[in-house]
Structure formats: C-alpha cells, structure tokens
C-alpha cells in the first residue's frame, strides 16, 4: 500500500492487487488507496479473515515492524491472472514479501512471461525468493535482507548470489549500492532532519518504479528514489507521509 501510494503521488498510473477483511482496518486501507488515486478494482474483500495489520515500534527515528499479513495471505493464482490480464509488455510489476509466497512467486513468473519489468522488494526476507531471481529484473533488499538471503554481508563482492540484472541494496543514511551489467556504484543519500524512517524503504521502491516508468535511466532513477525516501523521513507516518510530486519538486530545488 505504501509503495503504491508513493508511486501514484509522484504521478504514476498504479493498479493494486491485494485483499482486505470486512473490518475497519480494511476499509481504512482501501480509502487510503482511493484518496491517493490508486486503482483498487482488484482489491478483494474477504468475509472469513481479518485485514493485515502491522505493529510499528519507532525509537530515535529508527523502526522495527511486526506484521500479520491477514487477508493478503489469501491471494490466489486466479486473482493474479486476472490482475495481469490488463498489463502490457514494458509495464512495471512491483511486489514484496508481505504476501502469500506461493501467489507472489506465481505472479513474478507470470509477469516475467508477459515481459513486464519485474521489481521485487524482499521485505521481509524469505530465502525462497533466491530461486525466483531468474524471473526478476530488479531486486531491492536492504543490508539485513541481503545477508539473510545470501548468508553474506558483503553485498559489493557477493551480489552475484542474487542473480538479477540489477541489484539495489539500500543502505539507509549511506545511500544505496547498485550493481548492473555495466558495473556497480554507490549512490549517496542526502542529509535531512530525520523524524521517522518508517516507510522509507516503501517510499524508495514506489519512487524507483515511478521514475523508471518515466524513462529515467537506472542511475538517475536510483538517485531520485533516494531523495524521495529521504524527504519522506522528514515526516511522521507511512502512507500519509508519502510526498506529493509538488512537494518533491520543491525539495529537489533545495538540493541544487
């Protein structure tokens, strides 16, 4: 949800696949997506399971998140097929670890077959995703997730263990490490007054796919995504704190 809101607030045309329960949490999440302009025609409502929830602890600006995926664990292959039926080659498919793994794995495979650009944010980390990398174009773990997936903390030398065309390891205030077929580089972060890092990774992923959809090359997309995530950390909250395109434009002018 946070990633979808970020991409849409920047100007993307975002369609969302997910499931909620018939409860206040689900209604609130759907309303958040609607207000952000995200297409919710593929958000299913379940009567036999509650909506997913997250317990977020923030200490000195850093966060720890505990998740109960709830209804989102019930996404089926048929719903994935229906969702992807409207896609076109070159569209971007973004998913992450807060899903039924089997459905997510199936979606990654089908999106790849349909020649979509497949972006996976492996949060929380699940080692099973390593077997799916042949169908992934861009994977975006943070340092902890990279270590959990590969058994190594040396992302600069062991990036090949996640065999994707583009590897992006987000490094918090240190920026991000990017590895492509043409080489690797560190994209530094900008300094801001951090209030709350919750949702910063989501802001990064949502912005990354938006800028890629706007035909930015990977280096510029990574740079802009980092700036967007940094701006988000100056606000408290997650979806409500995702900057609009106007807010981001003003922020970019301060960096010139």
Image: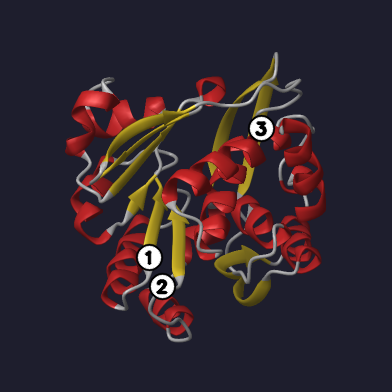
Residue 38 seen in this snapshot: yes
**Left or right: residue 53 compared with residue 195:** left
> Which residue is rendered at x = 27% and y = 25% of the image?
156
Q: Earlier in the sequence, mark 2 or mark 3?
A: 2
Of badges 1 and 2, nearer the viewer stands 1
Can you tell which mark lies on residue 230? 3
Residue 222 appears at what percent x and percent y? 49, 43
Residue 123 appears at what percent x and percent y? 44, 41
Residue 236 appears at what percent x and percent y? 79, 32
Quadrant of the image containing the N terminus = bottom right
Cα–Cα span, label 2 and label 3: 35 Å
Q: Residues within 10 Å of mark 3 (few under 14, many from 20)?
A: many
Q: Are marks 1 and 3 in contact (CB under 8 Å)?
A: no
**Left or right: residue 21 compared with residue 147:** right
Q: Earlier in the sequence, mark 1 or mark 2?
A: 2
Can you tell which mark lies on residue 76? 2
The secondary structure type at the circle numbered 3 is helix
Q: Is residue 164 above or below residue 89?
A: above
**Front-lying residue, 218 or 166:** 218
> Which residue is rendered at x = 63% and y = 37% of the image?
227
**Front-lying residue, 96 or 175:** 175
């Amino acid at each position: 949800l946070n990633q979808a809101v970020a991409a849409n607030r920047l100007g993307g045309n975002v369609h969302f696949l997910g499931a909620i329960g018939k409860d206040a949490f689900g209604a609130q999440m759907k309303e958040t997506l609607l207000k952000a302009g995200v297409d919710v025609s593929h958000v299913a409502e379940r009567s036999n399971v509650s909506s997913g929830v997250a317990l977020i602890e923030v200490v000195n600006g850093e966060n720890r998140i505990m998740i109960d995926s709830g209804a989102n664990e019930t996404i089926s292959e048929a719903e994935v097929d229906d969702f992807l039926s409207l896609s076109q080659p070159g569209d971007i498919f973004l998913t992450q670890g807060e899903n039924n793994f089997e459905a997510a794995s199936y979606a990654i495979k089908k999106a790849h077959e349909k020649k979509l650009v497949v972006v996976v944010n492996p949060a929380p980390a699940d080692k099973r995703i390593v077997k799916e990398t042949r169908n992934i174009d861009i994977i975006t773990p943070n340092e902890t997730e990279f270590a959990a997936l590969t058994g190594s903390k040396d992302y600069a030398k062991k990036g090949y263990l996640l065999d994707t065309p583009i590897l992006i390891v987000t490094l918090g205030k240190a920026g991000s490490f990017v590895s492509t077929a043409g080489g690797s580089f560190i994209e530094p972060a900008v300094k801001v007054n951090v209030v709350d890092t919750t949702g910063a990774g989501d802001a990064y992923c949502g912005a990354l796919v938006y800028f890629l959809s706007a035909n930015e090359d990977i280096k510029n997309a990574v740079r802009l995504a980092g700036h967007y995530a940094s701006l988000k950390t100056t606000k408290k909250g997650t979806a409500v704190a995702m900057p609009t395109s106007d807010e981001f434009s003003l922020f970019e002018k301060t960096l010139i």
